Image (cartoon, rainbow, N blue to C red):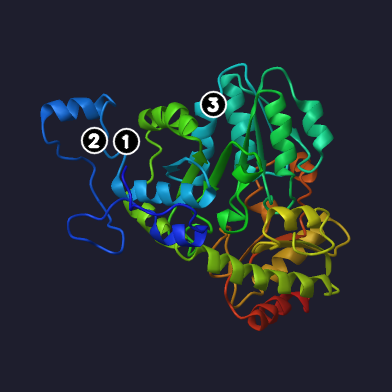
Amino acid sequence: MAHHSLPSGLHPDTLAQRVAVEPSQYGENSEALYLTSGYLQPSAEVAARRFGGQEEGYTYGRSGNPTVSSFEMRLAAMEGTQAALATASGMSAVMLMLFSLLKSGDHVLYSQSMFGSTIKLIGSEFARFGVESTMVAQTDLAAWKAAMRPNTKLLFAETPTNPLTEVCDIQALADIAHNAGALLAVDNCFATPALQRPMDMGADIVMHSGTKYLDGQGRVMAGALCASEDLITGKCLPVMKNSGMVLSPFNAWVVLKGLETLDIRMRAQSARAHELALWLEQHPAVSRVYYPGLASHPQHALAMRQMSNIGGAVLSFDLKATDAAAARSRAFHVLDSLQVLSLCTNLGDTKSLLTHPASTSHGKLSEDQRQAAGIGQGLIRFAVGLEHVGDMQADLLRGLDTL
């Protein structure tokens, strides 16, 4: 759909404020929220052309909405892609991508360090429909190459990963995929286009859970796929129209407005995360801190190249313990001692959120799958918000200093 006529070459910060559909006849400055399921048609002939795809125009809420279009256009501009398609949640974006690109007998290759629901969706749910899959170590390029098959159609990586913040070489994975005629999809939830644009490094599809940093205040569920016009309109849109995994106009409007402050939020929250990661590394109760901005992170140099020299706003840390049971008990003690920060499995909020991945986000995985992903019982994930660093440290010490 048509949008504001803007000059070329604008910075993503500007695009985050200005890209949207044209204002209505009322000239609103803040993008309008169109709450409607249907659209009046000027004539039967026009309606026929629009429903038949011969003419642009809104026909039904499942096929498009001006507010949703504004969000899609803005996110695509920020990611540097030709198009984007909004979905009801991050997982529905993954589902839409898989349904649109894979069929029975195809093979998908993905990281063993991905979000737990993604692992279950690919490895269990899609296996019922004859889609083969293989998990590999996120950072082992040789393992990715060795696992490729003639029927491999898609490589799927998350960088940084949830919750251990492992970073993959996007360009190298893109080369592996393209040399075999496959596509590379990248989950850019943790970094967002404010820090990282996977398409600039060869990715074919960028997936988002807009529920996280794109919204930024933990208000609504949303998801999106960003890719070429051919992939979005030719592959994904038909499946979207038939499946109904659409984003509601209200949720689209909330996330659309969230994009306007994404850059400053990501930079401010990342700066706090870096300071806290350095501090946690020195605490005697902590055995290891996982944060791409630390020099101790195994992929630190790669992360700095890919993520605008910023480590992001999520860190995780392991507590010292003698065994798994003790580790779980100690992690629960730290979390239950919080008085300011939130015990919550979401992330991307301006409020700091902490969780125990082994019993929540990755709780449905088998113990072998958790161990393969490096997620122990003493691991705590910390999505850093905008509270004062001193107050965050004091709240963590309530548990850390009383173990």
Residue 366 shows up from this direction: no
Q: Is residue 178 left or right of residue 205?
A: right
Residue 384 falls in image quadrant: bottom right
Res. 59 mark: 2
The reply to whether discs 1 and 3 touch (Cβ–Cβ < 8 Å) is: no
To which quarter of the image does residue 123 belong? Answer: top right
Mark 3 neighbour class, 10 Å CA radius: few under 14, some 14 to 19, many 20 or more: some
The one nearer the camera, 387 or 395, is 387
User: Which residue of the protein is positioned furthest toward the left in this rendering?
Assistant: 43
Residue 63 is marked as 1
Distance from Cα at disc 2 to Cα at disc 1: 7 Å
For mark 1, does the 10 Å Cα neighbourhood hold few (<14), some (14 to 19), or many (20 or more) residues?
Answer: some
Q: Quadrant of residue 194?
A: bottom right
Residue in view at x 78 percent, y 75 percent:
279
Left or right of residue 26, residue 184 in this image: right
Circle 3 SS class: helix
Q: Which residue is mark 3?
A: 101
Q: Which mark is residue 269?
A: none
Residue visible at 76% across and 45% down in the picture: 373
